[in-house]
Amino acid sequence: MLHSKLERILPNVQKPARYVGGEWGSVIKDKGAVDLRFAFCFPDVYEVGMSHLGSRILYGLLNDQEGVWCERVFAPWVDMEKEMREADIALYGLESGDPLHQFDIIGFTLQYELSFTNILNMLDLGGVPVLAAERGGLKNLVVAGGPCAYNPEPLCDFVDLFMIGDGEEIMLDLTALYREAVRGGWSKHDFLKKAAHIPGMYAPALYEVSYHGDGTVAAVEPRDGAPAFVQKRIVKDLDTMYYPDYFVVPSTDIVFDRAMIELFRGCPRGCRFCQAGHTYRPLRTKSPEVLQKQAEAILKHSGYEEISLSSLSTSDYGCLSELTDSMLNYCEPNHISLSLPSLRADSFNVELMERVQKVRKSGLTFAMEAGSKRLRDVINKNLEEEDLLNACEIAFRGGWNNIKLYFMIGLPTETSEDLDGIAEICKKVAYTWRMTTANRARGVKVTASASCFVPKPQTPFQWDAQNTLPMLAGKQDYMKKIMKTKNVTYNWHDAKTSVLEGAIARGDRRQGKVIYTAWKSGCVFDGWDQLFSLDKWLEAFAACGLDPLFYSARQRPLDELFPWDHIGCGTTKAHLKREWERSRDAVPTPDCKTKCAGCGANALLEGGKCCV
């Protein structure tokens, strides 16, 4: 039935391969032989979701369990949604074609705030009640995890359970408890009470939030025995952690169409703007032997011709030289490219350059973030201008002529001199090419991209006001005027989406009504410029009696209770406060491998502790 309907509508949509399934490596199980069906939902298009490593890991993990069948579900683009609604086709799992409402657990990964309306839209399109209060039984239990779960409050009206931290262990505890609940005929409320005691699991229905007259949070009170504080769950040993030996091979081009292996979790650097750098702590690494074995298995089973070494800061992996040598021994004779993303300029050297270019020489990317040493000290970037210029000189002498530089505007304490510094750095990079390249006739391409700073929960900058839209627009106009160096291309991020992201990122439970209202007014794919409407969102905030500037542009006092303070990321609030205070004095903090800053995250490891 579904097949015949799809045959009629797919000729009318872009990229029909997104919607047909049947890819190499996808898992098909006998429905009669499973007692738990799990829909793993990525609230964006197929090309984005299929590029996400975490989703690939959890897909393999769940399907590796006897009696569990996990299927993939992606958000259909607007043309496909229109055709589906007109043809009365419910959103379905790619493996079976069954509608979403037939699944037991519906899981979403929360990668960025501007995907939240897509979650509501996918539930509705799949025939599942959007509001958690309207889903009375255990069927269609909606769960979520990922980076945005570190402030789950804006989504509490829609999600039954949030998984805080690494999903590999908590996911199996969830499915085991769910199967026990179904066998025992538990009520949903009884199940949630039990689930709330799984380490890393947050059941928002078991908590009541009260507010002061000024709109700030007064208290978050647990009920029915739920814990007052939910600390994240981590995988302690990455070498023994589950990792798939195959990936589903996409049927169409995706954003990152390659095999990936994960070097380590966490980051020792402690950049004060970076949520991942604080929420993924403590640092845990894989051995080169395990990585080599995993890489070969994935490449053999998937047929990929490129593999990427994935981490927050690849050059911080202590055995990188050893690993790249052994990887290249396998990759070179098999004509497989090895890519090393997330390299730091202060770690780029001739030896590393020679390894990177052995199979394929692509562009290099360095994130400077700020244009002056003072501001880099404020954000704890710990990167000197000389580090970048030395890295560029090495690259240009080695034949590279394509460099990408990443910056941010709107950072705390930023001045016009810091913006001038961005233009000056780009000018110096172009000059370095002219002075060092062996072939000027080839030309050079320097691309400078500037995103807008968004203060995130669980970071030292969670107290800081975000620049307003007029402030960001003014800075972007200024940057356009001063970025005039030949061979330097300047790109900037849409400030309108950034200010909405800033409002939702530090939102509270009252924002659920705003998200629901915005979705009802037609907001979907808010992270896509061609569909984003700030006006609709502002109207939704106004209709719900809330001011987005209260969440984004307000400097928070250091003693304010945040909506997410009952959710633990491992890094303590006391440490984040110390780092905020150091930022005001532009005092950098050494990386974890040099000196422990006492963030608290090592306490999550057996026998581990941080010392101040």
Image (spheres, grey):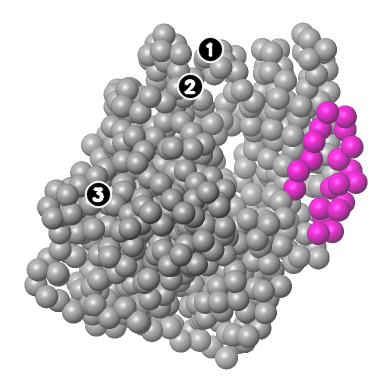
Task: Magenta stretch: give its range.
Answer: 473-492
Q: Nearer the viewer, mark 1 or mark 3?
A: 3
Q: Which residue is mark 2?
A: 338
Residue at x 88% of width, y 29% of height = 486
Q: Earlier in the sequence, mark 1 or mark 3?
A: 3
Magenta residue check for 474: yes
| Residue at x-position 57% and y-position 91% | 213
Left or right of residue 12, residue 406 in this image: right
- Which residue is tagged 3? 62
Q: Amino acid at mark 2?
A: Leu
Q: Residue 283: image x %, image y %?
A: 39, 41
- For the residue pair 251 and 435, the one nearer the viewer reads as 251
- How packed mark 1 is, by other alpha carbons closer than 10 Å (few <14, some 14-19, many 20 or more), is few
Residue that mark 1 sits on: 358
Which comes sooner in the sequence, label 2 or label 3? 3
Residue 233 magenta: no
Image-based side of 239 in relation to 569, left or right:
left
Using the rendered image of the protein, determine whether residue 81 is visible from the camera's viewpoint: yes
